[in-house]
Image: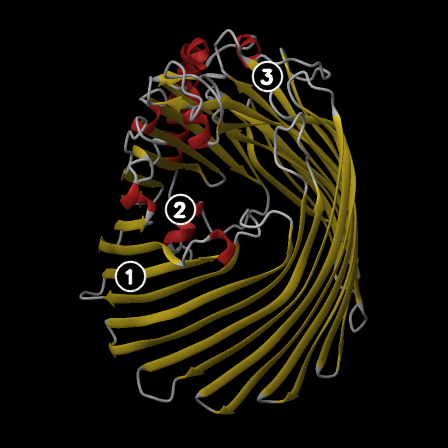
Amino acid sequence: MTDLKTMKSSRPTWNEKAPRCWASLLGLWMGTSAVLAADTNAPAASAEKPLTPQEIFEGGNVSYTNWIDLTTGGFIASGHNGQLEQEQQKSGNAFGGIEDMHYEQSLSNSTTVTVDGRALFNEGDYKLRLGIAKEKVGYLRLSYTQFRYWSDGDGGFYAGSGAYYPVSKDAVGLDNGEFSIEGGLTLENKPQVTFKYTHRTRDGEEGSTEWGLTHPDGGSLVRGISPTVDVIKERSDSFELNLTHHIKETDLGAGFRYETGRMDDGLNITQFPGEPVQQNITDREGTSYDLLGFHTFSETWIKTNLMMSSGFSYSDLDNNVFGSRIYGTDFGIGYTPNPLYGSGYYDLSGATHMHDYVGDLNLFYKPAPHLTIVPSVRVEEEDWNAESRGTETLANFAPTAFTQNSERAYTDVRQRLDATYNGFTNWVLYARADLTEEDGNLNQYGGLVPIAGIGLAAVTNVIDDRQFLQKYSVGARWYPSRRVTVDVGGYYKSDDYHYDNVVNSAPGNYPAYLIMQDSETYDGNFRLTLRPWQKVTMVSRYEFQWSTIGTTPDPISGLPGVESSKMASHIIGQDASWSPWSRLSLQAGLNYVLSETKTPASDATQAILNAQNNYWTLNFSSMLIVDNKTDLNLSYFYYLADNYVNNSVAGLPLGVGEEEHSITAALTRRISKNMRLSLRYGFFLYDEVSYGGNRNNSAQFVQASMRYRF
């Protein structure tokens, strides 16, 4: 695995660049003073039509179609950089370059060329788009984009012993790239044809944490941390051809898509980290695939109050899988027997083939001026089969071959009915019924086998399954006065899953353990919008949800059915906005969520606690128009989740204990009619108890930008 610390040390840090960057920012701001003074003292223009406030800020009534935004900035940070970079989705170093660029030029009265771009160094963020379009004839576009997703690269924290596993202080990066060529014919009164080729890539690493075997508390093999890095390398190419046409009262369309790709991903897992018996597991997960798809649709106005639309799609997917799970002293090495190594495999290969058919039919019917009814039905049928083979390993026993094959088929029918009525003065009523029925089967044969009598036998399962999902929603909006709006609504949702275990080689074992699982949810919500004064708006929200899940095991298990979990949630929100002055607007919001999931297991053992998901957020923002050339924006955000319980003595220490503060200020000043300067400052504070404080960080952020229009 790449040594991220070595990579990091090869480039200057923000703290090393800070003196030069601060001097550059100060010089840029001071250097505009002369221009600003000259602009302020310019002679008065001759009598013209007064400019609107927007035109004053924009520098006049001249329309500029081209611009370039230049920017530079960075963080001054302390603490754990990886969490900061993940939270802000920026590198912890200085950055700069072209934030946005647009250029267009008319070659004739009907032909336009456009160029758009972005390039920010140290961020892996680039965009270039070239286009040419001729009105009523067609267009051609070439585009390339790349951006980086940052994720914390640490390996986890075990509260039982205070052990922290820092894979890297800095975030790991995953680069996403896309190149496309798109063209279309848009001839008037002719079929519209478009074509697009797209090449996509994903390369890099993502942080991950797995619970696994380890000894952080001095010998327990029950629970612990296995620091993990997800290594990703993916490529895909897709070709799309679409055709649309309008004939009288009907819109018609058809499309074709072919995609091929390869995903060579894997997990680098460190087991027993930092111990003499540390093991490195390379879990490779590879897939190559070919996807062929076709779709059609139509939309027809049969009458002025009746419209029908329909669609159909077909997909054919072929997958080839490959992979391995190999223990060793390093990542990416071959298999060697060792009495300390766990269950693994190598030379995994296999294939999957899937067919998917989807059809839908919708009606829009308005039988009366105030009543709208929309019935719809959607039918999907899918079937697939899969087979695989490989060589299983365990410790230093002789490797053993294994095979597996499975089949799955189902038919899914979804019916929905929407109705809206506004025939009562100041009222709007709506209702929806949504029903889904599914019948299917799953057949499984083979799989991993015991080695030296260790492990479960290969399975033979034949399962018929049925699902019935239903949801009923009602609501109303009432306008008792022009300054008051009331919204009331709710829904009932029920999901029933039935499993008939026709053949089961291991009675009572999962997945044949269940014969039924059902859930119910009741939801009620209320929203009140008040406008007590012309420049004040207040929005109050409350929502309550109550959910239960029931589970019925196979009778062979000897266990009765049980209400396996209950969840209650209260969601409270309050927002307010006030514009006390034509140059000033204020907004504030508060959201509070109380949510708890309870299971019977939490009454029987301390190893499993009730799940808490309580949190609240506070936000405030303001915009002040200092003068006709200057805007000032201020904002504050606060987040608190206090659900962490250190339960490491009895079980897993789950739950989140996290607190965030964010303060930002942005000043925008128009220097001349085609130049604008912006300064932005931010302060961020992050504290996470559930990681023992190892992810805590604080940072200041400074950014200067200049827009030049031409």
Quadrant (top left/top right/bottom left/bottom right) for the N terminus: top right
The span from disc 1 to disc 2 (Cα, nearest Å) is: 46 Å
Does any portion of residue 622 appear in the rendered image?
no
Q: Is 225 on the left or on the right of 404, as rendered? A: left
Q: Please name which of the two marks, 2 or 3, marks the residue nearer to the observer.
A: 3
* Residue kind at label 2, given as amino acid type: Phe
For marks 1 and 2, the one nearer the N-term is 2
Q: Are marks 1 and 3 in contact (CB under 8 Å)?
A: no
Q: Are marks 2 and 3 in contact (CB under 8 Å)?
A: no
- Place residue 439 in its image quadrant: bottom right
Q: Please name which of the two marks, 1 or 3, marks the residue nearer to the observer.
A: 3
Q: Secondary structure at mark 2?
A: helix
* Residue kind at label 3, given as amino acid type: Asn
- Which residue occupies 30% across, 82% down? 426
* Residue kind at label 1, given as amino acid type: Phe
Label 1, residues with CA under 10 Å away: few <14, some 14-19, many ≥20: some
For marks 2 and 3, the one nearer the N-term is 2
Disc number for residue 57: 2
Query: Where is residue 371 drawn, in percent x and y?
Result: 45, 87
Residue farthest toward the left in the current orientation of the protein: 532
Disc number for residue 322: none
Quadrant (top left/top right/bottom left/bottom right) for the C terminus: top right
- Place residue 582 in its image quadrant: bottom left
- Place residue 573 in its image quadrant: bottom left
Label 2, residues with CA under 10 Å away: few <14, some 14-19, many ≥20: many
Disc number for residue 280: 3
Q: Which residue is mark 1?
A: 544
- Which residue occupies 42% across, 27% down? 703
Observer-nearest of 593 and 84: 593
Count up the numbered dots. Answer: 3
Query: Where is residue 668 drawn, in percent x and y?
Result: 38, 37
